[in-house]
Amino acid sequence: MQPMPHQVMGYDRAITMFSPDGRLLQVEYAKKTVRQGSTAMGFVCKDGVLFVTDKRIVDKLIVPEAVEKIWKIDEHIMATASGILSDSRVLIDRGQIRAQQHRVTYDTPIDIISVVKSICDLKQMCTQSGGLRPFGVSLLLGGVDNNNEPKLFETDPTGIYFQYKATVIGEHGNEIEEILYKEYKETLTIEEALKLAINALKKVIGDEINSDRVDASYISTDKRSFTRMDSKKISEIIKKK
């Protein structure tokens, strides 16, 4: 396979170097890394926010319960990621510290957008500083704000963010996105969205899907508390046709 002209010219060797057509190639490589990561979905429901992820456990000797794909930022905020998950640990730590600093200083829960902006500031800095590389990970952050409004945000390796009603990152993203366009409704409950997400995973993963492989968590508008979904409920939905 012949190398691309821009690679021959060396425009992908430094994060601070633009190619002649105005692209930062290292950032584009980071986005490709995200597309190869395990699938993660987020839903804004009428009664809260739901995250469903594929833990993609390929080794039978791994303890499934020890693999985390969804993390608590604060009681009312959670996050999941796709791409290089070791990169996400740094960003998750930053979000958790930012949330705790706000709670200690002001004695109130932090807004979700403040955590999103703090994480994206660090991501953006790594696109314009020599000696660094972009974070090879996209994050979904969601939860229930102080006005009891459920919110969902997606951040990408450039540091940009968007607010979504429902979204998917990682492998099989295009196929699942088509399913969401057809079947997602703002009136879905958390339980209905869970069924939609698992059925979407069943279509793209096939017979390999099981309850050990799927991770799901939600934050409801009434309790505003991070809750991990019971594996028995996930297993029941997987077994239904």
Image (tube, rainbow, N blue to C red):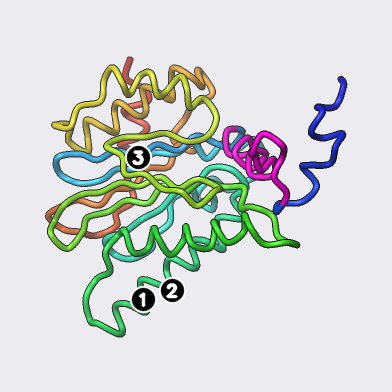
**Can you tell which mark lies on residue 97?**
2
Q: Disc 3 marks which residue?
A: 42
* 21 versus 91 height, above or below: above
* 146 versus 158 height, above or below: below
Q: Are marks 1 and 2 in contact (CB under 8 Å)?
A: yes
Is 157 or 101 nearer to us in this picture?
157
Distance from label 2 to label 3 (Cα)? 23 Å
Q: Earlier in the sequence, mark 2 or mark 3?
A: 3
Residue range corresponding to the magenta coloring: 17-35
Q: Position of residue 58 (x, y in %)?
A: 64, 35
What is the crowding at mark 1: few (fewer than 14 residues within 10 Å), some, or many (at least 20)? some
Distance from label 1 to label 2 (Cα)? 5 Å
Left or right of 233 on screen, residue 59: right
Left or right of 46 on screen, residue 231: right
> Residue at (22%, 35%) from the top-left corner?
191
Please tell me whether mark 2 sits on a helix, a strand or a loop.
helix
Please, what is the three-letter code of the amino acid marked with disc 1?
Gln
Please tell me whether mark 1 sits on a helix, a strand or a loop.
helix
Left or right of 227 on screen, residue 204: right
Please, what is the three-letter code of the amino acid marked with disc 3?
Gly
